């Protein structure tokens, strides 16, 4: 038997290697794969590969914001099968995060179903949830079909996927990124879109001198991170060199900032206090936090906490920490919570992202610059694509118009030709047409021969020629491309811009100092105005109204107050006065009330007070009335329902009262009824109400007010006819009666509004054209109750009077205080029509340990122009876009 070759059993060639060198090379390959293809985002679109593939797959599936949702399992399968050959759990987790409003500052996926919670609950299984692209994701993917980005082959070479998205949105900054690679990690905080867009516009305006732009210049616009969960961030940190932690992070790309929960201290019954937490630091688990607090109390590390409960719901977060009566300084407990729990945490900023495929630590300026450079490439490639298409279309249109100009000859050539090819060849020679033009002529339907169709072709040709000239000029001038990017930023801000959620504290935080939400706001007078079109904004001490916009509610508040907004549909929302922007913004976005519903009331309640004497009196257009306590209102947060209203009904009036007076209702046909307020018992927020007046002949209620014996009743109709009558002219009746005539109106006219005020008080008359006129009540002629009126306000064609509004006076409500001092708690409110000054004597205030009085005293402010530190004759100013002008 022949000897067997010693290498015959070897499979392939075996060679000796240095294991140290091999491990280094293999680990380096693995590390680069993790860094480049998994853990770090691209600086241009702010996305990791898995997120980019998910969004592109959803775009490829046609899951636009206006299309039906699709099962998450279907989307995950699409991503796995086409672009991302990894585990399904990894893809689903990545997609779920883009649908979580507590993780993403601006959502990229619109999810339907359970996608997790701030309590750490995992999303439901992918077979239960559904998703589609969010609106902002379409801006990330926009123009991707126009050859704006490069594509590479997918993992099996059968499909193409984008290397980067066009990204008209600065996603890296506004949504941030978190990832752990090999030997490095990234932790980029989210930011406010409006601020980032303004910073980009500022950078573009100084593009030629970009080296002179400093981090301080950019921080005038980008104030700091803006987390989806809100919270409070301290700019200065004594552990950072120089103290300015935010500036250091933006200047170097790395830093540490302190983030704190938003908490305020509220006085409770029987001399107790409570701590209320409404916002947590970013990525803090609420359930784990509550468990941590409970453990600290159980172990005796924190004393004085008697109860701990979570009242959070879909409208917002609310953690209640009840304190014992022995706690004299609640800030001590709050300081312990900040020290021992994640209610105060440090966020480490690491602005690490991929630049040209390599990880780079980026400053704020560099991140903005990279985004602008990326958009320059996208706009250029998009313009080149559009230019090529426009030239192709213009070329075809030239041929069609040439054929239409010689229509008879073209038809004759076609009829005499043996076939299409012969006709094509003859037309090309005769009219010097290209192959494409001739094909378009032969394919042209007969309807194009009509005169109107010919004019459309001529108009389209002119449009294409203008577009070609614009695009050619654009491509020749880099400054024009920058101008396009700047305009895109302004449009982005208009579409998606919102108020900042995380408050930046500029003052240096001293060691051991405890700061509450109340301490963070500087006291000061502010006017808040709601308008007919749903806009809401804030003024300073001077009341300024927007030109050509009719107000529906005015309130003079303190910057530390909570603002309550209530719509005609009975929905309410709560927000801090300081959080309202100076720029007009939709109330639906600011407060969360339903869009399309008119704001009928705004009230400013003192922060940290849960027991307020007094009532809200609500009236609907179908004559239903309801009374709720101010204490119940003070306990509300987020969004809530104040009244259960029928579909065909709406609230027309909300008034604050002391509970012992009378109310007066008026209908469109001039019927009025006056009855005792106590005839309407206080109800819960979910109740509907009771009948206030019996309506006949399809009549509706248009206004209501609290009776003031020394004042007069002013009424005005849609056609501007009005009068005033003495309060004694209106007899007292029982609730739910038909009432008596308050003003006689013509058949084609109707009552528009009601005001009860002093003769020297000033009121606003608003019209359907957005006009408002300020007049004194004495301009209304005094007439009897059962009479008509006279022309108070001239209206033009297609214009009607919509309401009477009285600028709000400050109302003082007494609140229990420590003996012997008695401090009144001040509360501001403004409603669709005037606010009354309850005329009753001030009662003595009980001691702090006593319960809230059943019959609280209300001290009305003197009748005067409601502005701070201004003479009574000073009138509100109507603000135009250019400069304020006096109201007529």
Image (cartoon, helix red, strand yellow):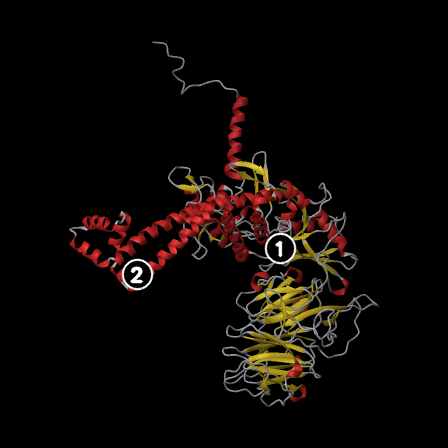
The C terminus sits in image quarter: bottom right
The N terminus sits in image quarter: top left
The mark found on residue 454 in the picture is 2
- Determine crowd level at label 1: few under 14, some 14-19, many 20+ residues with C-alpha closer than 10 A: some
Horizontal relation, residue 147 to residue 861: left or right:
left
Q: Position of residue 864 (x, y in %)?
A: 71, 75
Q: Is residue 125 above or below residue 595?
A: above
Q: How many labels sit on residues? A: 2
Q: Earlier in the sequence, mark 1 or mark 2?
A: 2
Q: Position of residue 354 (x, y in %)?
A: 54, 39
Looking at this view, name the residue that lies furthest to the right.
820
Q: Secondary structure at mark 2?
A: helix
User: Circle 1 is placed at which residue position?
Assistant: 501
Q: Is residue 640 above or below residue 31?
A: below
Q: Position of residue 4 (x, y in %)?
A: 37, 12
Quarter location, residue 534: bottom right
C-alpha gap between disc 1 and disc 2: 56 Å
């Amino acid at each position: 038997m022949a000897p067997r070759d010693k290498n015959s059993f070897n499979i392939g060639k075996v060679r000796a290697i240095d294991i140290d060198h091999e491990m280094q090379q293999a680990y380096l390959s693995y590390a680069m794969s993790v860094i480049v293809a998994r853990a770090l985002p691209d600086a241009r679109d702010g996305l990791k590969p898995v997120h980019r593939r998910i969004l592109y797959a959803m775009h490829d599936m046609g899951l636009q914001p206006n299309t039906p949702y699709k099962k998450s399992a279907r989307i995950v399968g699409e991503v796995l099968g086409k672009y991302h050959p990894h585990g399904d759990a990894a893809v689903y987790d990545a997609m779920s995060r883009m649908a979580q409003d507590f993780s993403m500052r601006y959502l990229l996926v619109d999810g339907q179903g359970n996608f997790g919670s701030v309590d750490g609950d995992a999303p439901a299984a992918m077979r239960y949830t559904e998703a589609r692209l969010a609106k902002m994701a379409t801006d990330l993917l926009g123009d991707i079909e126009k050859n704006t980005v490069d594509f590479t082959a997918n993992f099996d070479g059968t499909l193409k996927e984008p290397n980067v998205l066009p990204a008209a949105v600065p996603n890296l900054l506004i949504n941030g990124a978190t990832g752990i690679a090999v030997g490095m990690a990234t932790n980029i905080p989210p930011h406010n879109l409006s601020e980032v867009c303004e910073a980009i516009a500022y950078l573009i305006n100084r593009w030629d001198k970009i080296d002179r732009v400093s981090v301080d210049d950019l921080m005038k616009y980008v104030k700091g991170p803006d987390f989806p969960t809100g919270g409070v961030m301290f700019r200065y940190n004594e552990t950072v060199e120089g103290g300015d932690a935010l500036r250091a992070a933006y200047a170097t790309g790395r830093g540490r900032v302190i983030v704190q929960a938003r908490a305020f201290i509220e006085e409770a019954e029987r001399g107790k206090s409570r701590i209320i937490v409404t916002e947590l630091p970013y990525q803090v688990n609420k359930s784990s936090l509550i468990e941590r607090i409970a453990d600290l109390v159980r172990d005796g590390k924190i004393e004085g906490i008697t109860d701990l409960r979570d009242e959070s719901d879909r409208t917002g977060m609310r953690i209640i920490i009840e304190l014992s009566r022995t706690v004299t300084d609640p800030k001590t407990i709050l300081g312990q919570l900040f020290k021992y729990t994640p209610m105060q945490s440090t966020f480490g900023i690491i602005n690490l992202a991929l630049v040209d495929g390599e990880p780079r630590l980026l400053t704020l300026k560099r991140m903005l610059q990279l985004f602008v450079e990326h958009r320059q490439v996208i706009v250029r490639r998009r313009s080149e694509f559009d230019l090529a298409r426009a030239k192709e279309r213009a070329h075809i249109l030239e041929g069609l118009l040439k054929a239409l100009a010689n229509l008879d000859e073209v038809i004759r050539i076609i009829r005499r030709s043996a076939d299409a090819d012969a006709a094509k060849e003859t037309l090309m020679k005769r009219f010097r047409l290209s192959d494409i033009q001739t094909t378009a002529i032969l394919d042209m339907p007969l309807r194009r021969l009509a005169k109107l169709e010919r004019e459309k072709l001529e108009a389209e040709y002119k449009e294409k020629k203008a577009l070609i000239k614009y695009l050619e000029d654009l491509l020749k001038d880099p400054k024009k491309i920058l101008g396009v990017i700047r305009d895109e930023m302004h449009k982005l801000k208009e579409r998606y811009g919102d108020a900042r959620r995380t408050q930046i504290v500029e003052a240096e935080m001293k060691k051991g100092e405890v700061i509450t939400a109340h301490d963070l706001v500087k006291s000061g007078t502010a006017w808040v105005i709601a308008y007919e079109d749903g806009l809401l904004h804030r003024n300073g001490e001077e009341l300024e109204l927007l030109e050509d916009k009719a107000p529906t509610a005015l309130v003079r508040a303190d910057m530390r107050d909570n603002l309550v907004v209530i719509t005609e549909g009975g929905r309410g929302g709560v927000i801090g006065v300081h959080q309202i922007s100076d720029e007009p913004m939709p109330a639906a976005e600011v407060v969360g009330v339903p869009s399309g519903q008119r704001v009928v009331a705004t009230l400013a309640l003192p922060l940290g007070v849960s027991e307020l004497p007094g009532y809200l009196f609500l009236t609907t257009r179908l004559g239903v009335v309801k009374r709720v306590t101010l204490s119940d209102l003070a306990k509300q947060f987020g969004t809530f329902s104040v009244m259960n209203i029928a579909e065909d009904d709406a609230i027309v009036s909300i008034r604050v009262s002391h509970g012992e007076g009378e109310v007066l209702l008026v209908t469109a046909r001039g019927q009025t009824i006056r009855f005792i307020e106590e005839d309407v018992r206080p109800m819960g927020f979910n109740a509907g109400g009771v009948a206030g007046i019996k309506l006949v002949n399809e009549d509706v209620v248009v206004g209501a007010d609290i009776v003031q014996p020394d004042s007069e009743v002013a009424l005005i109709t849609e056609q501007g006819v009005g009068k005033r009558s003495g309060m004694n002219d209106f007899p007292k009746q029982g609730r739910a009666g038909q009432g008596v005539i308050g003003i006689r109106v013509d058949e084609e006219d109707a009552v528009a509004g009601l005001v009860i005020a002093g003769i020297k008080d000033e009121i606003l008359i608003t019209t359907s054209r957005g006009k408002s006129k300020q007049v004194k009540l004495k301009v209304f002629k005094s007439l009897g109750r059962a009479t008509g009126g006279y022309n108070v306000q001239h209206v033009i064609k297609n214009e009607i009077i919509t309401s009477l509004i009285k600028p709000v006076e400050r109302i003082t409500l007494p609140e229990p205080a420590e003996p012997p001092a008695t401090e009144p708690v001040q509360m501001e409110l403004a409603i669709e029509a005037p606010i009354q000054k309850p005329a009753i004597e001030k009662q003595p205030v009980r001691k702090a340990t006593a319960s809230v009085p059943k019959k609280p005293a209300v001290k009305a402010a003197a009748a005067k122009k409601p502005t701070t530190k201004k003479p009574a004759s000073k009138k509100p100013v109507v603000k135009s876009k250019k400069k304020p002008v006096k109201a007529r």
